[in-house]
Image (cartoon, rainbow, N blue to C red):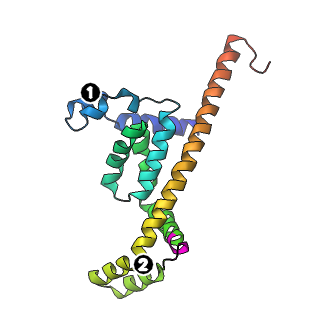
Amino acid sequence: MSALLARLSAWLHRQMPTHEQLEANRLTAPISRRRELFRFTRRSVPRGVAVGMFVGIFALIPGVQIVGAALMCVPVRGNIPLAAAMTFISNPVTTILIILPLSVAIGNSFGFHADVETVNAMVRSGAPVHQWWTWLLSDTAPAIVIGLFVQSVVASVVSYFVTVWFWRFWIGRKHRARLRRSGRDFDS
């Protein structure tokens, strides 16, 4: 498992632009000068993960997600690379199988009536575009938006606290290993 994570980490590191490349671009230069947005600290990592989860689930438009996550990281001082990576939580498989059905169910629990079976009927009959818009703008759009919002808030809060716990666990493990190597006993 650790070999897979090491390979994934190395691949992600190769894909990320360098600070010099970001500073050379006039659009990203103001953000790239703030080094705390790119450091992996105990505060910036959970914030970046939470922002990435929120934007990745709520904003289902692929090009907007990474830019939105980077812009949201500036005021909350979150880690931009992690936020950008976490937006990939909403890929085509998870969006169709998990995120949208769950958002419709959440929206319907708020009193809306988004009918998923109507989609199957419209696909089978080859419905024209205006019929799709009518269906979407009925109760479906508010149900999906409310469901996405609730789902993204819950996912970002849970991911924040899981990341805080994981960070403390990882740092504690490194600290205990360092003490063992130096010959001191951590438990005594």
On screen, residue 5 versus residue 20, left or right, reads right
Dot 2, crowdedness within 10 Å: few (<14), some or many (≥20)? some
Q: How far apart are marks 1 and 2 (CA)?
A: 48 Å
Query: In the drawing, what numbered circle is on residue 20?
Result: 1
Image height of 182 relative to 2, above or below: above
Q: In the displayed image of the protein, which residue is found farthest to the left?
A: 26
Nearer the observer: mark 1 or 2; the answer is 2
Does residue 112 appear in the picture of this structure?
yes
Name the image quarter holding the N terminus. Answer: top right
Stretch in magenta:
107-111
User: Which comes sooner in the sequence, label 1 or label 2?
Assistant: 1
The spot of residue 154 in percent (x, y) is 54, 55
The spot of residue 122 in percent (x, y) is 38, 84
On screen, residue 103 versus residue 75, left or right, reads right
Name the image quarter holding the C terminus. Answer: top right
Question: Which residue in the structure is indicated by mark 2?
Answer: 139
What is the chief secondary structure element of the magenta stretch? helix
Residue drawn at (44%, 47%), measured in percent from left and top?
A: 52
Instruction: Look at the image and say whether residue 178 sits in the magenta stretch.
Output: no
The spot of residue 173 in percent (x, y) is 65, 27
- Three-letter amino acid code at the position of disc 1: Glu
The spot of residue 12 in percent (x, y) is 41, 38
Residue 145: which quarter of the image?
A: bottom left
SS at mark 2? Answer: helix
Q: In the displayed image of the protein, which residue is found farthest to the bottom?
A: 125
